[in-house]
């Protein structure tokens, strides 16, 4: 599993910069840069979501399904990077997040 650090503190699953969801989906089928990726699992905090998310702790290692087919770390839709950083400070939607670890193997 991959080590995940996440700055999307507005996400219902973010617990101390870690993810309490257990697994995430990185989106960006034809992405050629990290700006074209997103965390498809992002859910903005609401009072109900905060209460349910508090029942679990943040995980440092996590299963990452990856739809960013051009990423060097994508192996059959699974992330093989040893660690990734999801950025999304002040995110209000999935499209406000991105996988900062994305590296395009475009043209390779």
Image (cartoon, helix red, strand yellow):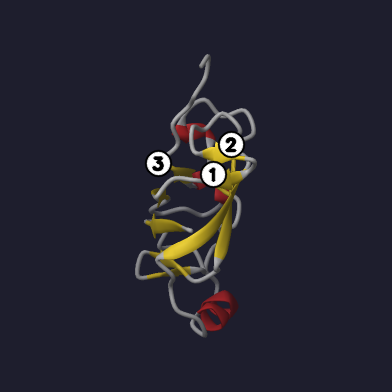
In the depicted structure, whether residue 49 falls above or below residue 83: below
Q: Which mark is residue 79?
A: none
**In the rendering, at what x and y percent does residue 58 appear?**
43, 73
Left or right of 40 in this view: 18: left
Q: Position of residue 83 (x, y in %)?
A: 38, 51
Sequence-first disc among 1 and 2: 1
Measured along the vertical axis of the image, is residue 49 above or below residue 9? below
Judged from the image, the secondary structure of the residue bearing numbered disc 3 is loop
Question: Which residue has dot 3 on it?
Answer: 100
Per the image, label 1 sits on a secondary structure element best described as strand
Residue 61 rendering spot, x and y as whole percentages: 44, 64
Earlier sequence position, callout 1 versus callout 3: 1
At x 40% / y 50%, what residue is drawn? 82
Q: Along the line of sight, which residue is nearer the eye, 85 or 8?
A: 85
Label at residue 38:
1
Label 1 – label 2 distance at C-alpha: 9 Å
Of tags 1 and 2, the one toward the viewer is: 2
Q: Do the residues labelled 2 and 3 touch (CB within 8 Å)?
A: no
The residue at 62%/28% (across/down) is: 30
Cα–Cα span, label 2 and label 3: 12 Å
Residue 42: percent from the left, percent from the top? 56, 57
Mark 2: few, some, or many residues within 10 Å (few <14, many ≥20)?
many
Can you tell which quarter of the image residue 95 is in? Answer: top right
Picture disc at residue 68: 2
First in residue order: circle 2 vs circle 3: 2
Side of 64 where 103 appears, left or right: left
């Amino acid at each position: 599993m991959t080590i995940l650090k996440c700055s999307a503190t507005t996400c219902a699953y973010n617990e101390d910069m870690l993810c309490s969801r257990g697994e995430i989906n990185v989106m960006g089928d034809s992405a050629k840069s990290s700006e074209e990726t997103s965390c498809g699992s992002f859910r903005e905090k609401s009072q109900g979501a905060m209460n349910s998310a508090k029942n679990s702790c943040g995980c440092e290692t996590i299963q990452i399904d990856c739809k960013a087919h051009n990423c060097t770390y994508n192996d059959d839709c699974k992330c093989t990077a040893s660690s990734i950083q999801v950025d999304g400070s002040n995110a209000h939607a999935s499209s406000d997040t991105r996988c900062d670890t994305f590296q395009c193997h475009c043209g390779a």
